[in-house]
Amino acid sequence: MRNFLLFFFFLFCLIPVRAAELTGLEILKKSEDNVYAETMVYTGEFIINKGDRSFVKNFKGWAVGDEKAFVEFTNREDFGVRYLKIENELWIAEEGDVIKISGHLLKRSIMGSDFSFEDMMESHKLSEIYEVTLSGEEKIRDEMCYILELESDKEDAPYAKQKIWVEKEDFLPYKYEYYALSGRLMKSAEVLETRKIKGKNYPVKVKMTDELRKGSTTMLELKDLELNVKIPEEIFSRKNLLK
């Protein structure tokens, strides 16, 4: 009997102990860590579709974490339009004038696209301003994803509610839904392509859809993306807005 008990104990010890389940907040933080970079330099384009109309906006951008961002449009129609973000403050330079954007104006469309100023230049990690709940799992593009539901009553939260699908293996965000306080779906976004850069699988192609306007979509594509490179401090200056 003693030998039998020892044998049973030995087999029990070989059974792997299941890892503790991740919380919604832990999953969100892993997703954020996967795409967070100390600095970014990139070129990119918006492909904007409004029903039967389509147009392209080209730009170049620089960013330091969540704190600083500078974007300059380079297509002929918008050449010289520049945006500067420092913490929670945003300035736009256009035709020699500098305008400060704040409050509800941050929810306006950026260059006629389906992205708002808040969408492009969010100054907080979502994990810092939202309560997060893991509500289930779902397969997207043949990959199992966690479904996270986010809610916030903070004034600086870009949306009252969000829903995010995070791929289970690499914690990549695959899909977003953005809701008003009433629960009405306002926008959705889908990550269509990622690129491995310095150990990070970074989203480089995202389709944003305005769910309140039929046929209104914008494709955001980042090109020549560099992460964690040195950026001169003068890039993020008011003087650079009017160069």
Image (cartoon, rainbow, N blue to C red):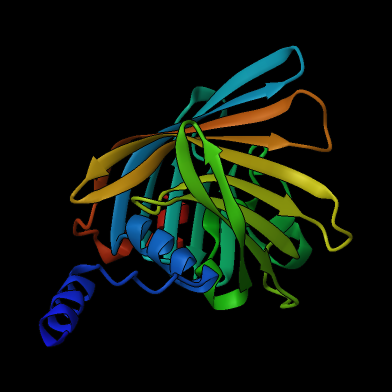
Left or right relative to 185: residue 243: left
The residue lying furthest to the front in this view is: 1
Could you tell me if residue 96 is visible in this image?
Answer: no
Could you tell me if residue 185 is visible in this image?
Answer: yes
The residue lying furthest to the top in this view is: 52
- Name above or below for residue 136 compared with residue 221: below
Left or right relative to 169: residue 48: right
Is 37 or 73 nearer to us in this picture?
Answer: 37
Is 30 or 65 nearer to us in this picture?
Answer: 30
* Image spot of residue 93 (x, y percent): 56, 51
- Name above or below for residue 159 compared with residue 128: above
* Image spot of residue 203 (x, y percent): 40, 42
- Residue shown at 30%/46% (left/top)? 201
The residue lying furthest to the bottom in this view is: 2
**In which quarter of the view is residue 4 placed?**
bottom left
- Name above or below for residue 41 compared with residue 21: above
Q: Which of the image's four quarters has the N terminus? A: bottom left
Is 29 or 142 nearer to us in this picture?
Answer: 142
Left or right relative to 178: residue 20: left
* Image spot of residue 9 (x, y percent): 19, 80
Is 87 or 23 nearer to us in this picture?
Answer: 23
- Residue shown at 24%/59% (left/top)? 231
- Residue shown at 76%/23% (left/top)? 215
